[in-house]
Image: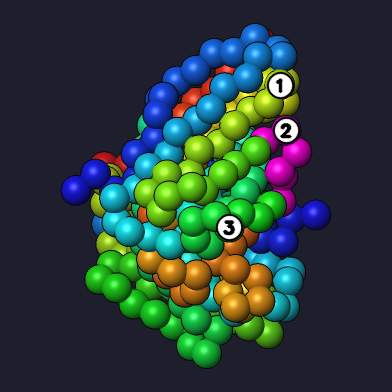
Amino acid sequence: NAGVTQTPKFQVLKTGQSMTLQCAQDMNHEYMSWYRQDPGMGLRLIHYSVGAGITDQGEVPNGYNVSRSTTEDFPLRLLSAAPSQTSVYFCASSPRQGRSPLHFGNGTRLTVT
Amino acid sequence: DQQVKQNSPSLSVQEGRISILNCDYTNSMFDYFLWYKKYPAEGPTFLISISSIKDKNEDGRFTVFLNKSAKHLSLHIVPSQPGDSAVYFCAASADPFEYGNKLVFGAGTILRVKS
């Protein structure tokens, strides 16, 4: 079982470049979300989606866009990368909006120079 | 302002002894709490959870205790094993119908179990 798959695993960008972090899940989960992990700050919610066509902002949404055209995919777009976006990004999903533990991917380590 | 705090960045325990990881929260709307374990280069994996209607939940070697009046929860691992060495994150959520399945995480505690 693949679970939550994130690509790429590593990425280096120059300031001002754009890119898309991919996330796909094969568990037919309705809820998907993106977190970033920074030292001393835990994981912070960027954007989330409760189903195809529905997205909303989390705690730290600035500089990021998302879309949810299918149940399986939830890409995260960096519009114009900044050094402050250097982080490890995790995609997560759960069966429904509710008391279900999130299933996480293995993360994308992004460095912006 | 962090709503979920793990004040111990790291903890070192001898194999076979008890590991106690602590977590405090400030938002009284939180009513569901989870612990995740994370190994290097992997995503967090769910370990155990507790609802605010309980004060204790056990799963094998792992027990989570919740003290609502103190807004404090703890994770006990007994006995600790070297494979338990990882980063442990405490997380909390409020009513999902009002706030969505959004988890608020603490900064994590690095647990090292020495053999």
Where does the image place residue A72, in percent across and percent down from the top left? 38, 49
Q: Residue at x 45, y 33 (%)?
A: A22
The image shows residue B91, relative to residue A36, as above or below, that is: below
Q: Secondary structure at mark 1?
A: loop
N-terminal label among 3 and 2: 3
Where does the image place residue A110, in percent across and percent down from the top left? 55, 23
Where does the image place residue A15, in percent across and percent down from the top left? 70, 12
Q: Residue at x 38, y 66 (%)?
A: A95
In three-dimensional space, the C-alpha distance between marks 3 and 2, rounded to whole angstroms, equals 19 Å
For mark 1, what is the residue?
A80
Where does the image place residue A106, in percent across and percent down from the top left? 38, 37
Work out whether disc 1 and disc 3 sit on a shared chain.
yes
| Chain at tag 1 | A
| Chain at tag 2 | A
For mark 2, what is the residue?
A63
Pointer 2 with pointer 1, Cβ within 8 A? yes
B26 magenta-colored: no
Question: Please, what is the three-letter code of the amino acid marked with disc 2?
Answer: Gly
Pick the front one: A56 or B29: A56
Pick the front one: B92 or A15: A15
Q: Bounds of the magenta span?
A: A59-64
